Image: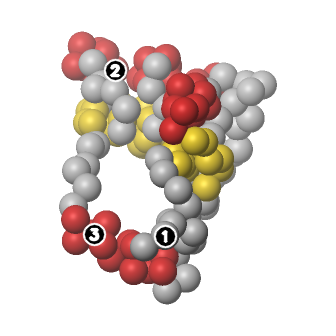
């Protein structure tokens, strides 16, 4: 994807390696946003899909920050559904939990190590459901 350096975040704090970057895309939140301010060069930007960047920290570092949020639109979701049915789009499903294990599913998401999506099964398998 064009990265100059890959950082194993389990062994190295990214802010000790990443310096003077143009953009930080924060998809984790928590302390990651706080640790990101110093990695962005003056005039750069932090985009967070999790938390609202703090204006005082942005100003202190001479950077900009925005929160990127979106609202699902029915037409887009319908198009995605059609693409999946046509086998042109395959979602990555990490794990499937029954609704009775919703707390465990949320705990898994909270680890920050989930690749793909977590699915909650809220009823019978639609393929086997009696019509």
Most extreme residue toward the front, as rendered? 130
- State the CA–CA distance, disc 1 to disc 3: 29 Å
Image check: 73 left or right of 10? left
Residue 90 visible in rendering: yes
Q: Name the image quarter holding the N terminus.
A: bottom right
**Relative to 9, is 57 above or below?**
above
| Residue 13 rendering spot, x and y as whole percentages | 66, 22
For the point 65% across and 35% down, which residue is it? 113
Q: Residues within 10 Å of mark 3 (few under 14, many from 20)?
A: few
Secondary structure type for disc 3: helix
Image check: 10 left or right of 22? right
Image check: 9 left or right of 35? right
Q: Which residue is disc 1 drawn over?
A: 130
C-beta proximity under 8 Å, tags 2 and 1: no
In depth, the one of 37 and 115 nearer the eye is 115
Q: Which residue is disc 2 drawn over?
A: 61
Q: Which residue is disc 3 drawn over?
A: 76
């Amino acid at each position: 994807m064009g990265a100059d350096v890959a950082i194993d975040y389990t062994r190295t704090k990214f802010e000790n390696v990443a310096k003077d970057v143009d953009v930080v895309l924060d998809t984790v939140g928590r302390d990651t946003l706080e640790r990101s301010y110093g990695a962005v060069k003056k005039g750069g930007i932090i985009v967070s899909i999790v938390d609202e960047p703090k204006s005082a920290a942005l100003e202190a570092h001479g950077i900009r920050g925005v929160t990127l949020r979106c609202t699902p639109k029915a037409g887009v979701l319908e198009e995605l559904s059609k693409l999946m049915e046509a086998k042109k789009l395959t979602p990555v499903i990490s794990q499937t939990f029954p609704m009775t294990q919703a707390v465990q599913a949320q705990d898994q998401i909270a680890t920050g190590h989930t690749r793909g999506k977590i699915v909650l099964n809220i009823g019978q398998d639609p393929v086997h459901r009696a019509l």
